[in-house]
Amino acid sequence: MNKLLLTLIAGLFATSVYAQTPAATPAVVKAEATANKDIAKAEAKEAKVVAKADEKTTKAAADATEKKTKAHSKAVKAHAEASTDVAKADPEDKMKAEAKAEKKVAKANLKAEKKMIKADEKAEKVAVEAGADKATAAAKTHETKVEAASDVKKAAAKH
Protein backbone atom coordinates (compact mmCIF):
# COMPACT_ATOMS: atom_id res chain seq x y z
CA MET A 1 0.00 0.00 0.00
CA ASN A 2 2.82 2.38 0.87
CA LYS A 3 4.58 1.64 -2.42
CA LEU A 4 1.40 2.32 -4.34
CA LEU A 5 0.91 5.61 -2.51
CA LEU A 6 4.51 6.63 -3.15
CA THR A 7 4.19 5.76 -6.84
CA LEU A 8 1.01 7.85 -7.17
CA ILE A 9 2.59 10.84 -5.43
CA ALA A 10 5.74 10.58 -7.55
CA GLY A 11 3.60 10.39 -10.68
CA LEU A 12 1.69 13.47 -9.58
CA PHE A 13 4.90 15.46 -9.16
CA ALA A 14 6.28 14.23 -12.45
CA THR A 15 3.18 15.23 -14.38
CA SER A 16 2.99 18.62 -12.67
CA VAL A 17 6.55 19.40 -13.82
CA TYR A 18 5.70 18.61 -17.44
CA ALA A 19 2.30 20.28 -17.29
CA GLN A 20 3.62 23.71 -16.40
CA THR A 21 2.97 26.28 -19.08
CA PRO A 22 5.69 28.59 -20.27
CA ALA A 23 5.63 32.19 -19.09
CA ALA A 24 3.21 34.33 -21.02
CA THR A 25 4.71 36.75 -23.50
CA PRO A 26 3.55 40.37 -23.59
CA ALA A 27 1.60 39.67 -26.81
CA VAL A 28 -0.29 36.83 -25.11
CA VAL A 29 -1.02 38.98 -22.06
CA LYS A 30 -2.31 41.76 -24.32
CA ALA A 31 -4.45 39.29 -26.29
CA GLU A 32 -5.91 37.89 -23.06
CA ALA A 33 -6.71 41.39 -21.79
CA THR A 34 -8.40 42.29 -25.07
CA ALA A 35 -10.28 39.00 -25.02
CA ASN A 36 -11.49 39.55 -21.47
CA LYS A 37 -12.64 43.07 -22.37
CA ASP A 38 -14.54 41.79 -25.44
CA ILE A 39 -16.14 39.01 -23.42
CA ALA A 40 -17.22 41.46 -20.70
CA LYS A 41 -18.81 43.73 -23.33
CA ALA A 42 -20.63 40.81 -24.93
CA GLU A 43 -21.92 39.55 -21.59
CA ALA A 44 -23.12 43.06 -20.69
CA LYS A 45 -24.96 43.31 -24.02
CA GLU A 46 -26.53 39.90 -23.45
CA ALA A 47 -27.66 40.88 -19.95
CA LYS A 48 -29.23 44.04 -21.36
CA VAL A 49 -31.10 42.08 -24.04
CA VAL A 50 -32.28 39.51 -21.51
CA ALA A 51 -33.53 42.23 -19.15
CA LYS A 52 -35.35 43.99 -21.99
CA ALA A 53 -36.92 40.73 -23.19
CA ASP A 54 -38.06 39.84 -19.66
CA GLU A 55 -39.56 43.31 -19.29
CA LYS A 56 -41.46 42.94 -22.57
CA THR A 57 -42.76 39.53 -21.53
CA THR A 58 -43.88 40.77 -18.13
CA LYS A 59 -45.62 43.80 -19.67
CA ALA A 60 -47.38 41.65 -22.26
CA ALA A 61 -48.59 39.25 -19.57
CA ALA A 62 -49.90 42.15 -17.49
CA ASP A 63 -51.67 43.63 -20.52
CA ALA A 64 -53.22 40.27 -21.30
CA THR A 65 -54.44 39.89 -17.74
CA GLU A 66 -55.95 43.38 -17.84
CA LYS A 67 -57.74 42.71 -21.14
CA LYS A 68 -59.04 39.37 -19.86
CA THR A 69 -60.33 41.02 -16.69
CA LYS A 70 -62.15 43.70 -18.69
CA ALA A 71 -63.69 41.10 -20.99
CA HIS A 72 -64.83 39.03 -18.01
CA SER A 73 -66.37 42.05 -16.28
CA LYS A 74 -68.27 42.97 -19.46
CA ALA A 75 -69.60 39.42 -19.67
CA VAL A 76 -70.68 39.53 -16.03
CA LYS A 77 -72.40 42.85 -16.66
CA ALA A 78 -74.26 41.35 -19.62
CA HIS A 79 -75.31 38.41 -17.42
CA ALA A 80 -76.66 40.83 -14.82
CA GLU A 81 -78.55 42.85 -17.43
CA ALA A 82 -80.07 39.69 -18.86
CA SER A 83 -81.19 38.55 -15.40
CA THR A 84 -82.71 41.96 -14.77
CA ASP A 85 -84.57 41.87 -18.07
CA VAL A 86 -86.01 38.45 -17.21
CA ALA A 87 -87.06 39.65 -13.75
CA LYS A 88 -88.77 42.74 -15.19
CA ALA A 89 -90.63 40.77 -17.83
CA ASP A 90 -94.39 40.23 -17.58
CA PRO A 91 -95.45 36.71 -16.57
CA GLU A 92 -96.83 36.04 -20.07
CA ASP A 93 -93.56 37.14 -21.71
CA LYS A 94 -91.31 35.34 -19.22
CA MET A 95 -90.35 32.50 -21.58
CA LYS A 96 -89.63 34.89 -24.41
CA ALA A 97 -87.53 37.08 -22.11
CA GLU A 98 -85.58 34.06 -20.84
CA ALA A 99 -84.78 32.97 -24.39
CA LYS A 100 -83.68 36.49 -25.27
CA ALA A 101 -81.55 36.64 -22.10
CA GLU A 102 -79.89 33.31 -22.86
CA LYS A 103 -79.03 34.55 -26.33
CA LYS A 104 -77.61 37.77 -24.86
CA VAL A 105 -75.54 35.82 -22.32
CA ALA A 106 -74.21 33.46 -24.99
CA LYS A 107 -73.21 36.40 -27.17
CA ALA A 108 -71.46 38.12 -24.26
CA ASN A 109 -69.62 34.90 -23.34
CA LEU A 110 -68.44 34.41 -26.91
CA LYS A 111 -67.21 37.98 -27.15
CA ALA A 112 -65.35 37.66 -23.83
CA GLU A 113 -63.76 34.35 -24.86
CA LYS A 114 -62.56 35.83 -28.15
CA LYS A 115 -60.97 38.79 -26.36
CA MET A 116 -59.30 36.48 -23.84
CA ILE A 117 -57.93 34.25 -26.58
CA LYS A 118 -56.54 37.23 -28.50
CA ALA A 119 -54.93 38.61 -25.34
CA ASP A 120 -53.28 35.26 -24.58
CA GLU A 121 -52.16 34.90 -28.19
CA LYS A 122 -50.49 38.31 -28.14
CA ALA A 123 -48.77 37.60 -24.81
CA GLU A 124 -47.46 34.25 -26.09
CA LYS A 125 -46.21 35.88 -29.29
CA VAL A 126 -44.26 38.45 -27.27
CA ALA A 127 -42.87 35.67 -25.05
CA VAL A 128 -41.69 33.70 -28.10
CA GLU A 129 -40.05 36.79 -29.60
CA ALA A 130 -38.36 37.51 -26.27
CA GLY A 131 -37.07 33.94 -26.14
CA ALA A 132 -35.66 34.32 -29.62
CA ASP A 133 -33.97 37.58 -28.65
CA LYS A 134 -32.42 35.89 -25.60
CA ALA A 135 -31.19 32.95 -27.67
CA THR A 136 -29.65 35.27 -30.28
CA ALA A 137 -27.89 37.28 -27.59
CA ALA A 138 -26.55 34.11 -25.98
CA ALA A 139 -25.28 32.88 -29.35
CA LYS A 140 -23.51 36.19 -30.00
CA THR A 141 -21.89 36.06 -26.57
CA HIS A 142 -20.73 32.51 -27.22
CA GLU A 143 -19.32 33.57 -30.59
CA THR A 144 -17.39 36.41 -28.93
CA LYS A 145 -15.98 34.03 -26.32
CA VAL A 146 -14.84 31.57 -28.98
CA GLU A 147 -13.27 34.33 -31.08
CA ALA A 148 -11.48 35.69 -28.01
CA ALA A 149 -10.10 32.26 -27.14
CA SER A 150 -8.97 31.85 -30.74
CA ASP A 151 -7.19 35.22 -30.67
CA VAL A 152 -5.35 34.26 -27.49
CA LYS A 153 -4.26 30.96 -29.03
CA LYS A 154 -3.04 32.77 -32.16
CA ALA A 155 -1.00 35.16 -30.03
CA ALA A 156 0.46 32.28 -28.06
CA ALA A 157 1.33 30.37 -31.24
CA LYS A 158 3.23 33.34 -32.71
CA HIS A 159 5.62 33.48 -29.78
Image (cartoon, helix red, strand yellow):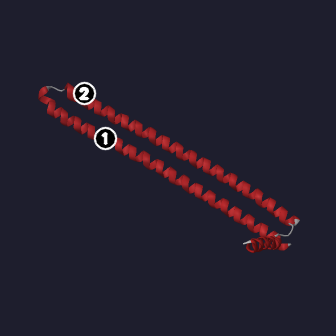
Task: Please name the residue shown 45% across and 40% down the image.
Answer: 65
> Residue 119 versus residue 139: which sits nearer the camera?
139
Within-10-Å neighbours for mark 2: few <14, some 14–19, many 20+: few
**Residue 128 relative to residue 143: left or right:** left
Task: Please name the residue shown 65% across and 60% down the image.
Answer: 140
2 or 1: tag closer to the N-terminus = 2
The amino acid pointed to by label 2 is Thr
> Residue 117 location in percent, x, y?
39, 47
> Residue 105 location in percent, x, y?
27, 37
- Residue 109's label in the rendered image is 1
> Residue 118 location in percent, x, y?
41, 47
**Residue 92 relative to residue 59: left or right:** left
**Residue 104 relative to residue 60: left or right:** left
> Residue 112 versus residue 155: which sits nearer the camera?
155
- Residue 140's label in the rendered image is none
Give the number of marks.
2
The residue where tag 2 is placed is: 84
Within-10-Å neighbours for mark 1: few <14, some 14–19, many 20+: some
Say above or below: 20 vs 61.
below
Looking at the rendered structure, the secondary structure element under dot 1 is: helix
Say above or below: 138 vs 110.
below
Instruction: Determine contact: label 2, label 1, CB under 8 Å.
Output: no
Task: Please name the residue shown 57% across and 47% down the image.
Answer: 54
Q: Name the outermost residue toward the front.
A: 1
